[in-house]
Amino acid sequence: MHRARTRRPGAGTALSRSLHMHIQPDAEVPLRRGHGGISGGRMAVHYAGAALGRTRAASALSRQTHEPAGIRMASSEPRYVCQECGHEAHKWMGKCTGCGAWNTLVKETESADVEAQVPDLSTDGQNGTAAAQNQPTQLTDVEMEGESRLKTGVDELDRVMGGGIMQGSFSLIAGDPGIGKSTLMTELGGYLPGRKILYVTGEESKRQVKLRAQRLGVDSDALYLLAETNVQEIANAVDDVAPDLLVADSIQTIYRPDLTSAPGSVSQVRESTASLLKLTKEREFSTFLVGHVTKKGTIAGPRVLEHMVDTVLYFEGDQNHAYRILRSVKNRFGAANEIGVFEMREDGLREVPNPSEIFLSERGYGVSGSTVVCSLEGTRPILVEIQALVTPTSYSTPQRTVTGFAAQRLQMILAVLEKRAGLAFSDHDVFINVAGGVKLEEPAVDLGVAIAAASSFRDIPADTGSALIGEVGLGGEIRTVSRVEPRLKEAAKLGFDRAVVPENNLDRIAGDYDIDVTGAQQLKEVVDVVL
């Protein structure tokens, strides 16, 4: 027995009216017959809901169409940003999929109308003036007033900067804590007499900076101190002082108030740097940003930070040694990989005009495992001592300990010595040290590392009057290196009698450098000649 279905009077009519309210008159609505006893009222609800969804979507599209240009409403959905590489994710993860670092994702949320709240850092705050300055200009019509550089009077610093600090340049200097970054930036006040310098500190008070300046002997009326981290307040101070040089120590402490993320986060570092970059280029003064480094030795913050600046400087050195190396890894106004050598003393940093002589001053003679290599750092050749110690191992796996040289490259050199020169290191511990706390990355020092290891293995001192130059290939061949002539000149200046270079470099040597130049093709023949 089937029970008849009943329907309230007017129910279908009301739903039909709702359906007609949400569907345009000219819209084609497909009608399907109900299955399984589905009533017309339920079918009407289905079509009414679909129509309502389309209506809401149309309303949202209308709102987007009528939003004012230049205003972007922030999404309520948070994002997670890696503090190592800047990779963004929609949910928290223990391991960053961008760089593989662990526990580096931090939750960040943009505030509403972010673009509308960007601080106005233009010269007069008027869009018309800024637009007039940014009109396309033909290359031949660009006015050049001559290259203007701030000469510091410190040859080592001017060398690294390409001949001086370029007017309007935007530079970043980074290094380990306590290496001397703030010391060098404070001493700029003494290096540039008569030039206005605005020193912005976000990590110290004005009193602390003054105490350091007194210890360094810096007493200049043109050095202004500002303890501030708000980028807009820094821009106001620039208006008041009109400096020739701005120092921000450090960029990880500076923030923009329109961003909700904490100072030092990826978003804050990126946007604060962009604001200071705009300010620097519009006012045409020079800026130095002091940056932190991570545990791996890379600059903390997003990678884009290094792309935005004109110059990237690393302040290197072992804190157990007195010498510091200022290295430029990027320079739009000079040679990259240029270095300047300083000595850290109680009264500050002092330049070292002849670093090769300093690095070789404590070299031991008549000791096995010691060689001298000539590394080209930028445009400067530097002679450095390589020390090796090879001893029988007492472990199941031999140790390979390296300081100042790439560990993977040492593994390759030892394998070549075993295969091509017949020296078995598989049951020996190998320790390599670059004297003076210097870090060498150039392949031209391979030959010196190989001969030092072979000398210690045989316990035979290498020729103390020879400088070794050459890259070692997997076949045991000595490969060509670039710019061998300045290396020979530096070796001859320091009194070396002979230089061993790749055979193919002999044809490229022009002139007499008062040094005996010996060409070599294979690693084995160098081992037999030098040892």
Image (cartoon, grey):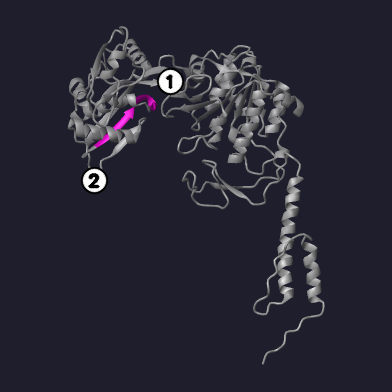
Q: Residue at x 19, y 35 (%)?
A: 424
46 shown above or below 383: below
Where residue 522 appears, as percent x and y from the top left, is: 22, 25
Left or right: where 507 falls relative to 142: left
Q: x%, y% of residue 360? A: 33, 19
Are discs 1 and 2 less than 8 Å apart at CB?
no
Q: Quadrant of residue 144?
A: top right
> Which disc number belongs to residue 378?
1
- Can residue 125 be seen by looking at this rendering? no
Residue beneath disc 2: 396
Q: Which residues are magenta?
A: 429-439
Location of residue 469 with respect to 388 vertically, above or below: above
Residue 378 left/right relative to 310: left
- Does any portion of residue 7 appear in the rendered image? yes
| Residue at (80% x, 64% y) in the render | 21
* SS class, disc 2: loop
Extreme residue toward the bottom, this view = 1
